[in-house]
Structures are given as C-alpha cells and as structure tokens.
Image (spheres, grey):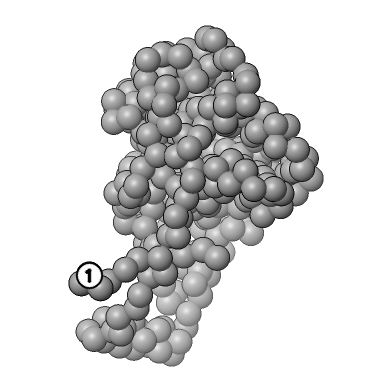
C-alpha cells in the first residue's frame, strides 16, 4: 500500500502563465516516454515480479513510487502555467461573460483548447498533441534483463525529450521542474544501468543519454552540484534491499558513486489552486460557499487531532 504526504518533491518556481509552455510540458506527462508511463511501467513490473531477486524488485518499485511524485509535480506545474492565463478578474459570484463578453476567448487560440474546455486551466492526461495517455505503452516482459533494458531506454528517451522541452521555453516555472526531472532521469538511468552491470553489462562511456554536459543548463547545474543525480531513496517504510544494487561506482564511469538514501530529501509546499469563476470552478454558490467556509474554519480550529502511528516506524523509548 502507499502513503501520501501533502507536499511536493521539488518546489514550483513562480513565473507568468504560459499556455504554450504548459502544452509542451504535457509531453513529459502524458506522452509515450512521459512520467505517467514510467510510473505505470515500473509499478506493474514490481507488482508482477517473480522469484526472490528482492534487490532488483526493490529498485524497480522504489523508482516507480518516486514516479508517482513526478506525475504530481509535473501536473501541478502544468496547472500553474495555465492558471490565470485568461486574466479574468471578475468576482467569484458574478456571471462570467455577462453582457456577451467572451472571457475565455483566448482559449480557442491555444494549441490545446481542452485545457480550458475540459480541464478548467489545469493539466490533462494527454501528450503535447492532445492524444490521450495509452496503457499499451506499459511494458512488463516478465524477464528481468529485458525489463531493465526497456526501463533504461524509457528513462534515456524521457531525459532526451525533457532536454528538448527545456530549450523550448525560458519560463522559470517550466525550467525549474524540467531541470529537476532531467537530473532525476539521469539518476534512474544510473539505477537501471547499474542493475544491468551487476548482470554482466559493461557500459564503458555510453552513458548518460543524451551524452552532453547538462551543467550548461544553469538550473540543472545547481541540482548536479547537490548530487541528486547519483542518489535514490527507496520509498519503503518496512525495509528495502535496493542498496545492494544502487551503490558503488556509477555506471557512467566518471568517478562518482551511487548512494541509496536512508531518509527522503526535503519536500516542498503544494501551491493552492485559486478559484476560477470564468471556468465555474469550483462553482460554489453563496450558500454552498458558506458551508465550505464553515468546514474549513472547523478544521483550522480543531487543534487536538489524534496521534497516528506510521507503519514501520517505532515510537521513541520503546
């Protein structure tokens, strides 16, 4: 089972709304080599894992769980790039477009009008061309070596495409998220390449893909300097054998080492999506809004919540 923390794996940097950048980033979410596929592919491989080669299962599953947070991050980033782009400033209880003014007129000129018609200025499970995400892209061959090879190609292609997306826009919101994903894709390349290395593969100087100095991207360099391209958290509360694979010299053969983290890195606040009356979202009338406000006030004043234990963690003194 899974547990969720109401925070993000990487901060979202504020900038102006940019629907074009949002649409380009959709490829990194719902495209054939996007985060939705990596999440589903790695999780299904771990769910269907056969035999007792536990370190390999834990490696695939740990990365798959991290991919859930990547889907969350990139979805929130796309929404941030779309939110407020029509520049509507009406009161939330007004009728948008009264008097015949088309308050969402700019939506029909965008690359994907569904972002406004269907998504209410938020992310969709589609690629940059508007094609729905497709479950047939998920590969689980039932063969460990073939799965690891497939996963390495997936992470390599994902990193390649994100490098291209980075160069499509100077928007700070897009670049901050894409830079983080470029670096984490390299970490996952290292993970699957290391796993294959333990099974006899010699990478020499083939990695990473694409082979270039990504520190030339300023946002990427900051993350590389922090070392997050050579580390991986296991995302387990009950113990993991990932470290038996993800450790020692990196398969990039550049003198760096892989580190399995004992604790997760810092997480970051999730930006609250504002109300958008022009999209009728959330669409509460004054009476329903009063009920929602009362519930929010009750939760804020409820200062004595029951303590809950986290499975796998021991209380101090016991």
Q: Point out the residue furthest to the top here.
A: 205
Q: Nearer the viewer, residue 86 or 221?
A: 221
| Residue for badge 1 | 316
* Residue at 58%, 46% in the rendered image: 54
Q: Determine the image quadrant of residue 42.
A: top right
In x, y percent, where is residue 22? 52, 41
> Is residue 202 among the parts visible in the rendering?
yes
- Where is 152 relative to 35, above or below? above
* Residue at 30%, 80% in the rendered image: 307
In x, y percent, where is residue 120? 55, 60
Q: Determine the image quadrant of residue 60.
A: top right
> Is residue 82 found left or right of 108 in the rendered image?
left
In the rendered image, the quadrant that contains the C terminus is bottom left
* Residue at 41%, 26% in the rendered image: 248
- Where is 272 relative to 255, above or below? below
> Is residue 129 found left or right of 85 in the rendered image?
right
Number of callouts: 1
Q: Nearer the viewer, residue 20 or 243?
A: 243
How crowded pointer 1 is (Cα within 10 Å; few <14, some 14-19, many 20+) is rated as: few
* Residue at 71%, 49% in the rendered image: 50
In x, y percent, where is residue 229? 40, 30
- Where is 107 relative to 202, above or below? below
Q: Secondary structure at mark 1?
A: loop
> Is residue 109 among the parts visible in the rendering?
no
In the rendered image, the quadrant that contains the N terminus is bottom right
Q: Nearer the viewer, residue 175 or 205?
A: 205
- Where is 148 relative to 116, above or below? above
In x, y percent, where is residue 8? 38, 53
């Amino acid at each position: 089972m899974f547990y969720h923390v109401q925070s993000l794996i990487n901060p979202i940097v504020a900038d102006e709304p940019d629907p074009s950048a949002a649409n380009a980033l959709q490829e990194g979410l719902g495209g054939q080599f996007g985060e939705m596929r990596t999440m589903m592919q790695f999780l299904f491989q771990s769910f269907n894992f056969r035999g007792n080669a536990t370190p390999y299962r834990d490696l695939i599953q740990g990365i798959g769980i991290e991919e859930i947070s990547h889907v969350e991050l990139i979805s929130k980033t796309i929404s941030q790039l779309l939110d407020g782009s029509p520049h509507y400033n009406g009161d939330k209880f007004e009728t948008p477009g009264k008097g015949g003014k088309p308050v969402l007129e700019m939506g029909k000129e965008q690359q994907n009008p569904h972002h406004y018609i269907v998504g209410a200025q938020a992310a969709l499970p589609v690629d940059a061309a508007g094609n729905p995400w497709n479950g047939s892209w998920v590969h689980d061959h039932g063969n460990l070596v073939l799965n690891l090879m497939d996963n390495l190609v997936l992470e390599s292609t994902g990193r390649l495409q994100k490098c291209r997306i980075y160069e499509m826009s100077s928007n700070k919101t897009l670049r901050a998220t894409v830079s983080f994903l470029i670096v984490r894709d390299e970490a996952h390349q290292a993970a699957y390449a290391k796993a294959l290395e333990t099974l006899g593969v010699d990478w020499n100087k083939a990695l990473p893909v694409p082979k270039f100095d990504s520190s030339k991207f300023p946002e990427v360099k900051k993350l590389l300097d922090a070392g997050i391209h050579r580390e991986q958290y296991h995302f387990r509360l009950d113990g993991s054998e990932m470290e038996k694979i993800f450790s020692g010299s990196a398969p990039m053969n550049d003198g760096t080492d892989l580190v399995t983290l004992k604790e997760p890195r810092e997480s970051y606040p999730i930006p609250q999506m504002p109300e958008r009356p022009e999209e009728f979202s959330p669409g509460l009338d004054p009476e329903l809004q009063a009920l929602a406000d009362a519930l929010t006030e009750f939760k804020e004043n409820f200062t004595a919540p029951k303590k809950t234990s986290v499975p796998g963690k021991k209380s101090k003194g016991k």
